[in-house]
Image (cartoon, helix red, strand yellow):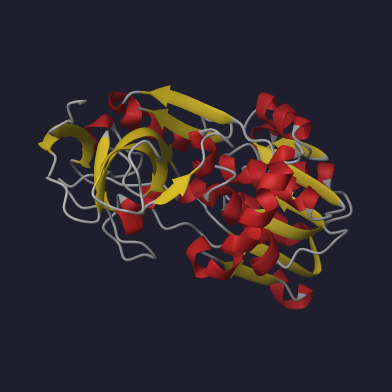
Amino acid sequence: MTQLPTSTRQVVLASRPQGAPSSDNFRLETVDLPQLADGEVLVRNVVMSLDPYMRGRMNDVKSYVAPFEIDAPLDGGAVGEVIASRSDDVAVGQHVLHGLGWREHAVLPAKAVRVVDTDVAPASTYLGVLGLTGLTAYVGLTAVAGMREGDTVFVSGAAGAVGQAAGQIAKALGAGRVVGSAGSADKVARVVELGYDAAFSYRDGPVAEGLASVAPDGIDVYFDNVGGEHLEAAIGALSTFGRVAMCGAISQYNSTEPPAAPRNLGLAIGKGLTLRGFIVGQYPELVAEYHSRAPRWLAEGRLVADETFRDGLDAAPQAFMDLLDGANMGKMLLRL
């Protein structure tokens, strides 16, 4: 019989950052694993997700999800192999998706995990286009922005995990033209390879000028991952009754001063614009719908996702900081 681990390593929040996080805000600890109770499973994590929203949870502010606690482990999406089980529903050897990342092992109730088939797709895919990443893009385009066939869609942060998915899903849903912004020439080239009709680097000049160069006739839908100057440019380019799905604002996550609102927000009145923020968990009714469509798009090659991997739990803090600096192409993941 294989000897089960009695302890594991985890990353805890050592202190709250002021501005951009540093290595001092994280601490690696070894802790004892509890004995399994009835209905619980022990999971050896094999891959975990690093996501921009986690930066907000490092602050002690009220939000849609509770902040991380000082001296407590961080958490987030992960996929792992069940190595012990006291549940009739989840067997040893199965791979499961769950919410206790940032650690090498996790003890969870079986009802808190979802069994995934790693023969159909790699484990990491269930943290990306077959998971919350893809679902977020789908929800934002459909339920929030009300994208229609023929729409011109602009996606900021197009080379990121949600950005890549949003552009491809928009095309799959019949968008007439999909354009994006990214942070380098390489990223611009990559999103065009993935199916974007055009893209620009926001580092080359004002965002409004870059957007006008790829969407001279304006846009109907803006999928916002960045906020700030990008949102201002999109408001200027949106057609009458245009719609904005406000998914994220990564340009502001490390700011120490409150960001200014878009200076042209008054245009929303005359244009009849809709600006709507959303959290993917607010749309549970779309989960089954997306999961019925995404595997087909994946199999057809219409939904392709880049992945940026780092290895080992020790690398997690730096990988997260690099994510906030835009070092990733597609999804930032940590192999354990």
- Is residue 77 among the parts visible in the rendering? no
Q: State how many labels appear.
A: 0
Residue for point 77% across, 33% down? 192
Q: Quadrant of residue 220?
A: bottom right
Q: Position of residue 96 (x, y in %)?
A: 40, 44
Q: Nearer the viewer, residue 276 or 258?
A: 276
Q: Quadrant of residue 285?
A: bottom right
Please give left or right for residue 18 compared with residue 282 in the image.
left
Residue for point 49% across, 35% down? 123
Please give left or right for residue 141 compared with residue 176 in the image.
left
Q: Position of residue 270 (x, y in %)?
A: 77, 76
Residue for point 12% across, 45% down? 35
Position of the N terminus, as image quadrant, is: top left
Please give left or right for residue 188 compared with residue 7 in the image.
right
Q: Position of residue 168 (x, y in %)?
A: 73, 44
In the displayed structure, 220 sits above or below 157; it is below
In the displayed structure, 227 sits above or below 23; it is below
Position of the C terminus, as image quadrant, is: top left
Residue for point 19% across, 56% down? 38
Please give left or right for residue 165 compared with residue 57 in the image.
right
- Is residue 64 among the parts visible in the rendering? yes
Q: Position of residue 102 (x, y in %)?
A: 30, 38
Q: Quadrant of residue 139?
A: bottom right
